[in-house]
Image (tube, rainbow, N blue to C red):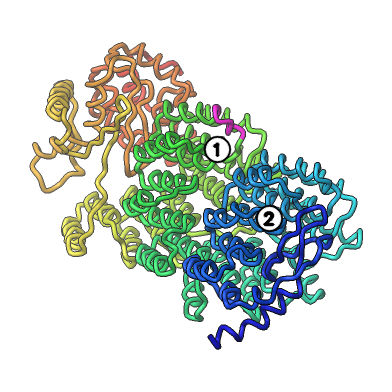
Amino acid sequence: MRRMSSHLSPLGSSIAAINVAAPANHPQTSPISSSCPTVPAQYQRISIPSHVYRHPSAALLELCTSVKELNQILSLIIKNGFYDEPLFQTKLVSLFCKYGSMSEAARVFEPIEDKLDMIYHIMLKGHAKNSTVDDAFSFIVRMMYRPVVYDFNYLLQLCGENLDLKRGKQIHGLLITNGFDSNMFAMTAVVKLYAKCGQIDEAYKMFERMPQKDLVSWTTIVAGYAQNGLAKKAIKLVSRMQEVGQKPDSITLVSVLPAVADIKSLRIGKSIHGYALRAGFESEVNLSSALVDMYFKCGSEESARLTFEGMNIKTVVSWNSMIDGYAQNGDAEEAFATFLKMLDEGVEPSNVTIMGALHACADLGDLERGKFVHKLSEQLKLDSNVPVMNSLISMYSKCKRVDIAAAIFDNLPKRTQVTWNAMILGYAQNGYIAEALNLFCKMQSHKIEPDSFTMVSVITALADLSIIRRAKWIHGLVVRTGMDKNVFVVTALIDAYAKCGAINTAMKLFDMMEERHVITWNAMIDGYGTHGLGREALDLFNEMQHGSIKPDETTFLSVIAACSHSGFVEEGLHHFESMKDDYGLEPSMDHYGAMVDLLGRAGKLDDAWCFIQRMPIKPGITVLGAMLGACKIHKNVQLGEKAAEKLFEYDLNEGGYHVLLANLYTSASIWDKVAKVRTEMETKGLQKTPGCSLVELRNEVHTFYSGSTNHPQSERIYAFLETLGDQMKAAGYVPDTNSIHDVEDGVKEQLLNSHSERLAISFGLLNTKPGTTIHIRKNLRDVWCWEGAQNGCYSSKAAYDWLTRSEDIVSHTNPWKKFLRLKLPPEKILFFLWLLFHEAIPVNAFRFHRHVAPSPRCNRCSDMSEKALRCLWDCPEATKLWGIVMGFQHVP
């Protein structure tokens, strides 16, 4: 009791000092406590009896910290007969609202006969904080009292947070009818509402109509432009406000710094930093944190670090800026190290901290560290925080544990649009296409409207299917939902059409776009490159260079890859040098890998190895893997061993590169080393990811592995292949079994016949009608499709007609080039032609062209560009082969 009495004197004096009453035309009411908001000066003053505000119950209300305690105090108030006292009624309503118990607040509020205006204001503020916009609006309409300007501010703020423009306009109308349309405080809230709802032009109109503007008004419109992506206008407004005598304060600077970061203007950012120092704002923690964020986004990591280290006081927001900054700049290791340092210094992480740490773990693909952060989030009671759960879903998806991500998603009681998007993207990134599409349909059945991010995730998933029909379906949905003008959605469509082989459709979409982002140019350049259209890719890149959008790191990666696929070695080398010299872009490991691939494909293995030796950074897996692959193609054992030795220093969790080295030794008949590599794989428990072929039939995807017999139609498929093989042998075909060892000849042929691609094609032919398009895709390499193949058509003329009218894949008159555009090795071309036409193909003619694809090369010419194609066309054996298959004579 003595402890409680120590709080009585301050409480009593403060209450006595602010006794208030209702307006003169309103029934006189009782006074309220000091914890309530200040009321307008026109209210009369009345007294609170001393025995009321000096009672211990009043002190207990001041000490209350939870709803549970409040209910215990409530019984004491009722017992002492103070429940009808306005002081206690007002304080009870205020506390119930504070703790989010609006039903309990209403139970106190509703029975009061003569309500103070102040209690109306408290109740409305509680609705604005804890209820929906509709509940708050209906309260102000239902309750007949005179609202004050602060009431409209609460409601407008609530509408802005919920992006409820319609209801916000209604409140704006009420504000005008109550005579507050010239009130600077009220109109600033209106400006903020329109800005938050994306109506920045309306916000500016309201701002311009204000007869008076203070610093808060100017800061609000600056923040509005910055939040709506109009960075340059936001910066201009800061200059303009100084011209009219308004000096920016620290809050103004915090509001404009995101705009500076958006345009990546380090010069303006440093100018603002200098202004802040001259104005004495260096101790403002929020401003310093905003400066750190700006420096990171402008690419000045060193300035960000120095600013952070110079802060005398670091809040959790400051640490978050550092963690997120490192993560956004691709330095995930440093981001996580900063997170651990923050924990060591005893700073309690917030939900934003956990999200930044999870972002770093996702980029690292580090499952163990991700689980550590997950466990920490549970200890911090953040396991019900939806944004944190969304980050966990993304992290587990990127760490290849989509099963854990799905479990988190399924157990979430509340899901936002971001939650659905994260799970859909997680499925898409991990190759679970069917699950991604099913979840997308389920999302729509839950009446959750997809946004542009949803569409991009779904299109990304469908692109991996490489089925033109699916691409057209999602394209139609994009048009119907009005997103066909969204630059990111249309860019995803361009990428999808290119992956489906519809490069002309992709180009049409590109040409139709009014606005193009750098990723749009990247997608189109990459599309040309993967289709072997290197010249078109370079022409488009040249057009981009003459425009307003500057190429980025991804652009140059796509350009170098296009040069690699088309054999443009000199052009690739030039653009690699230009990347740093002309654009100041530092090559990443992927760029070095692409350059090694460029030189390796061209047979310049010594140059490729020298390039690796001169690298300013330690060559990574992609670089050494490209070198080993090139050595395998060109059978260079010496350099292949050097590349493999460095490659195996890394902790590889998949045996693909070991198999590549074993195949290199096999091609050179070095059997003891083949055995050694296989033994090493067994010792380390390494396995190569098994290849499979997938074919879609009636909206169901069928998967085939080499030698698999678990498909319901396996007997029919193998019988079909056996019959076909006998017919091909009778026609003179001899299968090439040189790549298969350690088994008898009969088994070798059996292994060849049970290849996953042959199983998939046979299944497609057995289950489709003539004229049906059969799509085949692989899980380990670029997708290819048998587009427009006429099943059951045995006419050579009909087959040629098919080739010439298949505009999505074939657009040239050279028949050989048509096949090369399909990126098929000769074995598949032979198999396709035999299935289509049952023609006899001479073995010698076939074997002469074993290495036509994927990089066309003729025995008489080392060039891999158009010259190689012309040389190939001039080969008499090629002409003979084509004439036999197509049934016509070549006319030069």
User: What's the residue at 53%, 85% (across, down)?
Assistant: 1
Q: Which residue is mark 1?
A: 489
Q: Earlier in the sequence, mark 2 or mark 1?
A: 2
The type of residue carrying mark 1 is Val
Rendered residue at 23%/17% (across/down):
838
Q: Nearer the viewer, residue 623 or 75?
A: 75
Secondary structure of the residue carrying numbered label 2: loop
Q: Is residue 204 magenta?
A: no
Give the residue displayed 28% in from the left and 56% down from the top: 654
- As drawn, 59 above or below 226: below
Q: Position of residue 809 (x, y in %)?
A: 44, 26
Residue 115's disc is 2
Looking at the rendered structure, the kind of residue marked 2 is: Lys
> Which stretch is magenta?
479-485
Q: Look at the numbered discs 2 and 1 and tell me whether their residues touch, using CB distance below 8 Å.
A: no
Would residue 272 appear left or right of 668 to someone viewing this image? right
